[in-house]
C-alpha cells in the first residue's frame, strides 16, 4: 500500500547524536517504522570519533527523508545539540516536531498516538511515560504522567525529551527565542526541561500521556536517564547541594519570561528563609508525591548551606 502523504500528518523528527554508532541503527529503524505519518529525520552530530557522521551521511544519500545538518561543531552536551536543531531546522513545512535520542526504540504508533492526542485534546505539547531497559535484560516502567502542578515546569521536565512532540506553533515560537537569546541558552543544561517550561510559561497546554511510547535505553553514558539506583541518587544530591538545580530554575524562569511572576520573585534571590518558604510549597512544584518530599528536603538543605 502506497502512503498518501496528503492524508497523513507531517512530522520533523530532530535527532541529536554523539558517538552513537552502537545503537543508531535500532533507533533509526524504529523511527522509520512509524505508522500513518509522513516524517523527515533531521540529524545534528556532535563531533564524534566512532563514524557516526559518516554513517548518517551514507544514510542520507540513500534516503531522501534524512537531512544531516553541517558537521564539525563541538557542542559538549545534548542540550546544546538539540538547541542547534531547534534554531536551524525550517519547521514551516511540518505540522509537528518531535525530539529523538540516539539509542532508544520507539513503539510503531508513537507519533501517530501523539498527534491524535494533540489534536483531540487541543494541546501543543506532548510527552509520555517510558519503559526503561538495561543491557542485562531488566525492564522498569517509568511513570511521568502524574497530574501537572501550578509550578512544576519551573523545577522539572514533563518527562524524557525523547518522548516530546510539539505543534509547529509552539516549536516556531520557541525557535524565535532560541535564536534571539543564543548565548544565554548555552547555559541551559536540559533541553527538555527548558521546552516544557517555555510552553507552560507562555500559555501553551501540555499533555503527559500515561502510556510508554518508547523503550528508554539505560547505560553509563546516559546524561540523566531514568533516575533510578544509588548512582542517580548521589548525582541528584550533588546537584542539590551545589545549587545547580535552583540555578537552572532561575535561569530558565528568566529565559521563558516567568521571572516577573510573584511566585518566582519570592525565591529568585535565594536566602535561608526563602528556602524554608519554598520547601512548604513543594506540592505545587513537583508532580510525583515522592519527588515533592525530595524537593522539600532539597530546599531545607539549601537553607542550611545558604543558597543565593
Image (cartoon, helix red, strand yellow):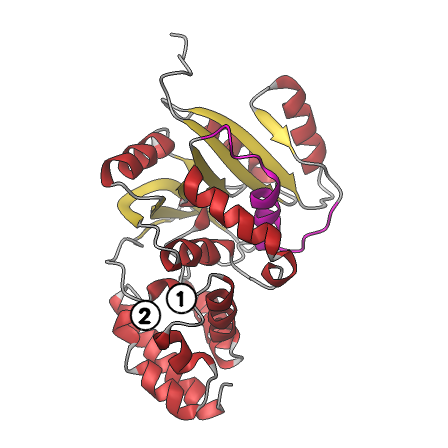
Q: Position of residue 149 (x, y in %)?
A: 27, 64
Q: Is residue 134 magenta?
A: no
Answer whether labels 1 and 2 touch (C-beta < 8 Å): yes
Could you tell me which secondary element the residue under label 2 belongs to?
A: loop
Give the numbered dot on residue 154.
Answer: 1
State whether residue 188 is above or below residue 97.
Answer: below
Bounds of the magenta segment? 73-94
Instruction: Give the mark, 1 or 2, whose residue is nearer the N terminus.
Output: 1
Structural crowding at the residue carrying mark 1, measured as other residues with C-alpha within 10 Å and reported as few (<14), some (14–19) or many (≥20): many
- Give the image quarter of residue 90: top right
Give the numbered dot on residue 177.
Answer: none
Q: Position of residue 236 (x, y in %)?
A: 46, 71
Which residue is nearer to you in this view: 85 or 58?
85
Could you tell me which secondary element the residue under label 1 belongs to?
A: helix
Q: Position of residue 107 (x, y in %)?
A: 37, 33
| Residue in the picture at 28% in, 45% down | 209
Q: Position of residue 129 (x, y in %)?
A: 32, 48
State whether residue 292 is above or below residue 1.
Answer: below
Amino acid at each position: 500500500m502506497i502512503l498518501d502523504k496528503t492524508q497523513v500528518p507531517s512530522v520533523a523528527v530532530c535527532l541529536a547524536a554523539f558517538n552513537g554508532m552502537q545503537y543508531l541503527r535500532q533507533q533509526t529503524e524504529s523511527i522509520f517504522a512509524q505508522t500513518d505519518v509522513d516524517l523527515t529525520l533531521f540529524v545534528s552530530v556532535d563531533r564524534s570519533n566512532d563514524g557516526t557522521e559518516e554513517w548518517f551521511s551514507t544514510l542520507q544519500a540513500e534516503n531522501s527523508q534524512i537531512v544531516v545538518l553541517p558537521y564539525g561543531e563541538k557542542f559538549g552536551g545534548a542540550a546544546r545539540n538539540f538547541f542547534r536543531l531547534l534554531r536551524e531546522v525550517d519547521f514551516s513545512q511540518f505540522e509537528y516536531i518531535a525530539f529523538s535520542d540516539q539509542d532508544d526504540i520507539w513503539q510503531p504508533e508513537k507519533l501517530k498516538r501523539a498527534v491524535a492526542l494533540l489534536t483531540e485534546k487541543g494541546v501543543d505539547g506532548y510527552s509520555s511515560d517510558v519503559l526503561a531497559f538495561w543491557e542485562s535484560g531488566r525492564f522498569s516502567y517509568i511513570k511521568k504522567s502524574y497530574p501537572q502542578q501550578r509550578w512544576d515546569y519551573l523545577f522539572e521536565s514533563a518527562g524524557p525529551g525523547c518522548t516530546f512532540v510539539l505543534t509547529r506553533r509552539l516549536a516556531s515560537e520557541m525557535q524565535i527565542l532560541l535564536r534571539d537569546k543564543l548565548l544565554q541558552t548555552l547555559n541551559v543544561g536540559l533541553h527538555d526541561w527548558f521546552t516544557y517550561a517555555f510552553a507552560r510559561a507562555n500559555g501553551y497546554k501540555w499533555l503527559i500521556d500515561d502510556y510508554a511510547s518508547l523503550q528508554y535505553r539505560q547505560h553509563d553514558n546516559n546524561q540523566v536517564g531514568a533516575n533510578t539506583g544509588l548512582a542517580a541518587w548521589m548525582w541528584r544530591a550533588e546537584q542539590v547541594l551545589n545549587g545547580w538545580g535552583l540555578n537552572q530554575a532561575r535561569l530558565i524562569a528568566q529565559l521563558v519570561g516567568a521571572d516577573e511572576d510573584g511566585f518566582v520573585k519570592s525565591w529568585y534571590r535565594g536566602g535561608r528563609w526563602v528556602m524554608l518558604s519554598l520547601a512548604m510549597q513543594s506540592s505545587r512544584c513537583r508532580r510525583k508525591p515522592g519527588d515533592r518530599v525530595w524537593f522539600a528536603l532539597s530546599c531545607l538543605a539549601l537553607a542550611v548551606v545558604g543558597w543565593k
